[in-house]
């Protein structure tokens, strides 16, 4: 996927606000904007940051060329149009790395720039972080529930065609083993995988009726006996029999995509073993979410295929992050109206942990302060530099590094934090804003 | 947004299935694939088709160039790669127009092509229709709840940055008046709108504290008194007083983005009227969904700004449509395994209505049959030609026509079908497959 122009992936009011600000010194005052979530989605214990790398990619496409200016000229004055023509983000960005856990109030991204430069990025930054983090947060729960069994992400058809690519990327950070999405394989190098389709088996229907064995034989001819045969188009028991008859006991895997997956997995495992196909794996799919995956823990399942619930955030399709102006010319600022208060002033965060590694608190403190001490606990600062003077810093963490970081971070959660049941955040957020 | 190459917005298995099929006559057998939803999202009374126009746009980008072939070559044989290099959809597509209501089993899209040509499009078609129809279906409920009051869609920041553009388009079909999203304005001509940001008001904070009046004055200077001032950054009553003091009673509108919107709207209306600003409108926003909109019916609200719930489908972020092979060489085919049966054979549909216009049934019949008679009822066929021989037909309905079509169609629902309460589909689907 090419990085297109991203300047119009924003809300009209970001531009009218710039227009109004440009007539005053306000436009050029040094400001700090912060991205954070007031709360986690209902009952969730932790969130997973994803999308930061995409924010940096799309920032480079945030330029107003003639085509973009023609659109904004409909409602903007000439001075603003001229300013936008020269727009290039020149500020600094720090933030949580991809694959980092976050909690309510965590300063996930901090943008330092003039008012006008910073306010323009609100919508684009939030779109990316809210989507990608929602997917990663849901996917991490599924990966935890699956334990050592791999998950294949196969939800592209259940979400917007480009969101699917970003979703596959986010799911990979969260620990999913592979994706069905080929654009994610091309753009981000996510390992791709695939099994077989009901349409393929149905396609071998002739005047005399279905011919499942012909379909299986054709698939093995093209893809080898290591392939995965879909055995539930007609009758599963007959399907398994046909599969092993055609492929022999060396068949790679069978997939079951419907019915009571636990019962079927047991029956199919028994049947495969009886047929001597003791090494043939079982892939299950069909409306799986983290709870269904957990319920299959005791069943002889080898791989999970997960679609809808993964790409839609399993009940929480957006992460609820917001982008707030917190400091102007060094002065802390905050909205005061009901229910939506926020805490002014630029902030940093560190995560405290016991000597065992188990985390204790998310500590949010003033960016100008030292990391607060915590008796007997280690404190790990959470923000890293991402952009300096408008350019991405060298040696940003790779996707694989984010994935490894999350795998390590999940181990540091208090044990109840990994549970699927609803509850409070796994650790509290403590504000040290003195 | 440019129409990029879309060939890799698919699942790996679509290509491996083609690879296996190409070794056999199966690949070239004439097939019929149908898109339909087995059921509506939980409790919904109707669905709204959206995305069909985008499907046709993206079909033209579904070509395998050298870059795409380099990716698929990793897992495909040379013959398949050569076939893909020449791939160009050459079949026919019929379907429901955008803005058409749909119900369980409605044949929303019918693709007639060889097996290999048709199977390749499954993922792309479903991604677009599942996303866009989910948004349109949710938005239509909000538009109904809002009655004659306009809705501004402002959810871009709560969803993937490109999904936001498609979402704005779908919401416009559903009757939303305008979007905040500028890319939707550029690409699809959706009217754009905007109000004001808290950051703008906060940006005027000086060493002596906030200066809401300076912010309001700057906004009016740039955008005129017809603008919308955001009055809830600090204290709403003072904010309204400041707004009228600065703008005079001719102020266009004030926006309230937090708190108990019903109570606040009443208080603000009273205050505005007392200040002589009887023509100043009230825009409310902040976690609105169709239920919250309905609950504000009796309050003096002029415009709704809706974000999160609209772009995430208000609890149903995907429409659950599937793409099934239903006919091969004229032979009906269908999966038989549990819970996921479907009805074989190419189908068409017509909607029956009483002389008053109120609709009665969705009648699904064999595509080769005549429209079934219905005593005393009119029957309107629902599919229109979309693609012939690989090319979009001339004079496809425009976005505005889809929008008008839906407005008319909603009036034909039985009255309980427009209710927000959970229930069965507004009309039943009757299969006449004899």
Image (cartoon, coloured by chain):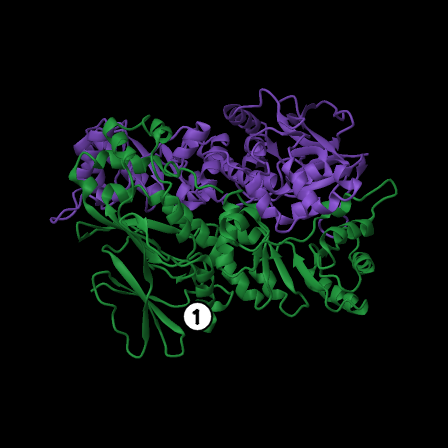
Chain colours: A green, B purple
Question: Is residue A263 or residue B66 the one in the foreground?
Answer: B66
* Residue drawn at point x = 45 percent, y = 69 percent: A408
Residue A308 against residue B333 in the figure, above or below? below
Residue B427 position, x and y percent, is 65, 35
Residue A72 as seen in the image, left or right of residue B166: left
- Residue plotted at (74% across, 58% down): A225
Taking the spot 70% from the left edge, 43% from the top edge, the residue there is B79
How far across and how far down the image is residue B84, in percent? Answer: 65, 39
Residue A41 in the image: above or below residue B279:
below
Against A343, residue B53 (above or below) is above
Viewport quadrant of the N terminus of chain B? top left
Q: Give the residue at the far left of this rendering.
A: B208
Q: Percent x, y for residue B20?
A: 73, 47
Task: Give x and y (percent) for residue B189.
Answer: 44, 27
Q: Chain of mark 1?
A: A
User: Where does the C terminus of chain B fall, quadrant-wise?
Assistant: top right
Question: Foreground: A356 or A246?
Answer: A246
Residue A146: image quadrant is bottom right
Q: Tell me, yes or no, if residue B229 can be seen here.
A: no
Q: Does the rendering let one see residue B309?
A: yes
Counting labels gives 1
Residue A323, above or below B293: below
Q: Label 1: few (<14), some or many (≥20) within 10 Å?
A: many
Residue with the mark numbered 1: A413
Q: Quadrant of residue A405?
A: bottom left
Judge left or right: residue B379 versus residue B278. right
Label 1 sits on a secondary structure element that is loop
């Amino acid at each position: 996927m090419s990085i297109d122009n991203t300047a119009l992936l924003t809300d009209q009011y970001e531009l009218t606000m710039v227009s109004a600000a440009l007539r005053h010194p306000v436009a050029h005052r040094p400001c700090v904007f912060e991205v954070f979530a007031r709360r986690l989605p209902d009952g969730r214990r932790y969130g997973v940051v994803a999308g930061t790398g995409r924010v940096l990619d799309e920032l480079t496409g945030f330029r107003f060329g003639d085509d973009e200016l023609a659109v904004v000229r409909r409602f903007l004055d000439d001075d603003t149009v001229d300013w936008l023509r020269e727009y290039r983000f020149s500020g600094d960005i720090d933030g949580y790395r991809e694959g980092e856990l976050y909690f309510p109030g965590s300063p996930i991204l901090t943008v330092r720039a003039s008012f006008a430069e910073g306010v323009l990025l609100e919508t684009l930054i939030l779109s990316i972080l809210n989507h990608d983090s929602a997917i990663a947060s849901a996917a991490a729960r599924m990966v935890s529930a699956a334990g050592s069994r791999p998950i294949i992400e196969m939800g592209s058809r259940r979400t917007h065609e480009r969101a699917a690519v970003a979703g596959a990327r986010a799911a990979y950070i969260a620990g999913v083993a592979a994706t069905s999405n080929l654009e994610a394989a091309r753009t981000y190098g996510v390992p791709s995988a695939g099994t077989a389709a009901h349409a393929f088996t149905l396609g071998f229907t002739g005047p005399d009726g279905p011919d499942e064995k012909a379909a299986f034989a054709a698939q093995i001819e093209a893809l080898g006996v290591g392939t995965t045969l879909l055995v539930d188009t007609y009758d599963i028991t007959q399907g398994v029999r046909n599969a092993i008859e055609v492929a022999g006991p060396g068949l790679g895997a069978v997939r079951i995509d419907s019915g009571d997956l636990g019962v079927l997995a047991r029956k199919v495992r028994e049947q495969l073993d009886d047929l001597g196909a003791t090494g043939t794996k079982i892939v299950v799919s069909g409306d799986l979410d983290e709870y269904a995956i957990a319920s299959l823990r005791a069943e002889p399942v080898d791989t999970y295929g997960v679609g809808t619930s993964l790409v839609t955030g399993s009940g929480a399709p957006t992460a609820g992050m917001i982008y707030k102006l917190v400091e102007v010319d060094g002065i802390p600022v905050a909205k005061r109206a009901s229910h939506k208060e926020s805490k002014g002033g630029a902030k940093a965060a560190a995560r405290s942990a016991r000597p065992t590694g188990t985390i204790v608190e998310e500590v949010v403190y003033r960016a100008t302060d030292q990391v607060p001490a915590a008796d007997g606990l280690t404190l790990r600062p959470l923000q890293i530099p991402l952009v300096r003077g408008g350019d991405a810093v060298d040696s940003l963490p790779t996707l694989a590094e984010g994935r490894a970081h999350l795998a390590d971070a999940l181990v540091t959660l208090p044990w109840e934090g990994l549970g699927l049941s609803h509850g409070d955040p796994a650790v509290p957020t403590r504000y040290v804003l003195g």
